[in-house]
Image: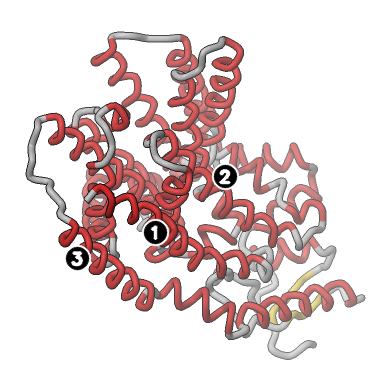
């Protein structure tokens, strides 16, 4: 079994990386055809051009939202520099950073494994994420969405890595640098959205409780993170814009309704994520990997099972609860994306904790022969192939890319830019987008009503009195 496992470890890791590449290549290719969305992207910069960069951010903070990180990034989007290319580069950077964050997390949780194995783990999570995420466009291509959810999700993983690294530093200068980066990450993540604020509060709180109960220690690093968390929460929740946003729906602020709705939604999504993906079979292989690690190498999985499970449920609930509590609506696709991202990471961690617990208790029920492992891997590969073939997301990215829909969308967008640039009329009529590549396109566009918010934002950005959608260029 040992010799067979070593052979698997070499071949299996590259298979895992291959799965990541299978979904990564079309995602990167589609970035070339990405464009700013009429939904929000133009509005932020139109406001900047009218009243200035700092004043525009202040306006949003005091009248619409307390998400100061999102405000900063959205008001600094590439349109500020009249760049369309920036919207093609940013998805590539985001996707690469997300994979690197997953790689870094697994590298610190299982330090005795190889770098190829860590990249393989990152590849599996990324592959599963793409298979079942609610919206590709909102995860990687629509800037107004990904700066509020995908970016802080990735930064949260880096914060966990910084915490693990801080306790392994030997010099004060190294600890100061890691601590500074960790503090900045807390500030940035909390300021992105209420979901990320709750997630960070839960992680910091769980870390504090665990250190107090099992180590009976409080260090300066813990105190500084707690202080930064408190200040950041105040800046988000205490903003006038946040109060205005929460008052927009009569169901907002209803705790019983929000709690029940969150648990129901989580149950529905959880069933879908577990039983309609190859997750169960990947979990079994993950347990085989855990069985080959020494007890010392599983040190980061040594927390109590009940504690890990409670934190897992808490983080997932934190992703969905604010949508019901804040504005009384179903979570949007970008929120579901975020919940699924943390679900995948937490799922593998939970099973690592469970395995470590039973291994310490000397339970010997987890025995894999070569024949059983080969059978498991054959089933896994068959399940992966079937899920890959059936996945609407996989079909969407390959169709938009290889059948030219994304290229056609790209061409139509540049034709629009040319019309707005070359038109000398104060009122410009733009044709609707016919080639809607939904892998990168968000179904929000200008309308035939010149007073629609998106129309007014785009008209202001391009210096027009009005921009109107029309089948006929009038």
Identity of the residue drawn at 32% across and 45% down: 316
In the displayed structure, does residue 122 sit left or right of residue 239? left
User: Mark 1 = which residue?
Assistant: 11
Identify which residue, 442 or 352, lies in the foreground: 352
Which percent across, then down, holds residue 50?
A: 80, 49
Secondary structure type for disc 1: helix
Identity of the residue drawn at 61% across and 38% down: 61
Label 1 Cα crowd, 10 Å radius (few <14 / some 14-19 / many 20+)? few
User: Mark 2 = which residue?
Assistant: 64
In the displayed structure, does residue 110 sit left or right of residue 440? left
Quarter containing the C terminus: bottom right
Which percent across, then down, holds residue 196?
A: 45, 40
Q: CA distance from mark 1 to mark 2?
A: 52 Å
For this orientation, the residue located farthest to the front is 3
In the displayed structure, does residue 4 sit left or right of residue 78? left
Residue 358: in sight, yes or no? yes
Identity of the residue drawn at 59% across and 60% down: 142
User: Mark 3 = which residue?
Assistant: 375
Label 3 Cα crowd, 10 Å radius (few <14 / some 14-19 / many 20+)? few
- When asked about the image quadrant of residue 129, the answer is bottom left
Q: CA distance from mark 2 to mark 3?
A: 55 Å
């Amino acid at each position: 079994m040992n010799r067979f496992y070593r052979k698997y470890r070499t071949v299996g890791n590259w298979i895992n990386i291959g799965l990541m590449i299978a979904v990564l290549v079309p995602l990167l290719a589609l970035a070339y055809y990405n464009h700013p969305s009429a939904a929000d992207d133009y509005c932020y910069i139109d406001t900047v051009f009218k009243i200035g960069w700092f004043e525009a951010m202040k306006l949003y903070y005091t009248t619409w939202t307390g998400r100061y990180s999102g405000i900063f990034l959205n008001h600094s989007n590439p349109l500020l520099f009249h760049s369309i290319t920036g919207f093609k580069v940013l998805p590539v950077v985001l996707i690469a950073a997300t994979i690197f964050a997953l790689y870094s997390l697994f590298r610190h949780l299982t330090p005795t494994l190889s770098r190829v194995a860590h990249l393989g783990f990152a590849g599996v999570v990324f592959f599963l994420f793409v298979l079942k995420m609610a919206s590709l466009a909102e995860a990687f291509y629509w800037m107004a969405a990904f700066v509020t959810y995908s970016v802080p999700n990735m930064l949260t993983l880096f914060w966990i890595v910084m915490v693990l690294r801080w306790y392994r530093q030997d010099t004060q200068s190294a600890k100061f640098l890691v601590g500074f980066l960790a503090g900045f990450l807390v500030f940035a993540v909390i300021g992105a959205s209420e979901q990320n604020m709750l997630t960070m509060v839960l992680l910091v709180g769980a870390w504090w409780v665990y250190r107090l109960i099992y180590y009976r220690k409080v260090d300066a690093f813990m105190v500084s993170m707690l202080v930064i968390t408190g200040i950041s929460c105040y800046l988000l929740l205490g903003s006038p814009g946040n109060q205005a946003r929460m008052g927009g729906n009569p169901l907002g602020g209803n705790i019983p309704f929000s709690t029940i709705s969150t648990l129901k939604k989580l149950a529905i999504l959880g069933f879908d994520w577990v039983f309609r993906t190859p997750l169960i079979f990947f979990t079994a292989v993950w347990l085989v990997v855990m069985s080959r690690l020494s007890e010392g190498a599983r040190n980061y999985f040594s927390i109590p099972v009940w504690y890990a499970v409670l934190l897992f449920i808490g983080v997932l609930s934190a992703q969905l609860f604010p949508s019901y509590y804040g504005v009384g609506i179903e979570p949007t696709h970008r929120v579901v994306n975020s919940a699924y991202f943390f679900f995948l990471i937490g799922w593998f961690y939970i099973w690592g904790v469970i395995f470590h617990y039973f291994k310490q208790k000397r339970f010997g029920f987890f025995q894999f022969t070569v024949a059983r492992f080969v059978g498991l891997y054959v089933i896994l590969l068959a399940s992966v192939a079937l899920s890959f073939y059936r996945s609407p997301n996989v079909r969407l990215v390959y169709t938009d890319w290889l059948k030219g829909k994304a290229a056609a969308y790209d061409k139509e967008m540049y034709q629009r830019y040319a019309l707005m640039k070359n038109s000398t009329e104060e009122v410009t009529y733009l044709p609707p987008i016919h080639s809607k590549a939904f892998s990168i396109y968000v179904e929000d566009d200008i309308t035939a009503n010149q007073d629609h918010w998106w129309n007014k934002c785009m008209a202001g950005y391009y210096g027009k009195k009005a921009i109107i959608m029309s089948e006929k260029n009038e």
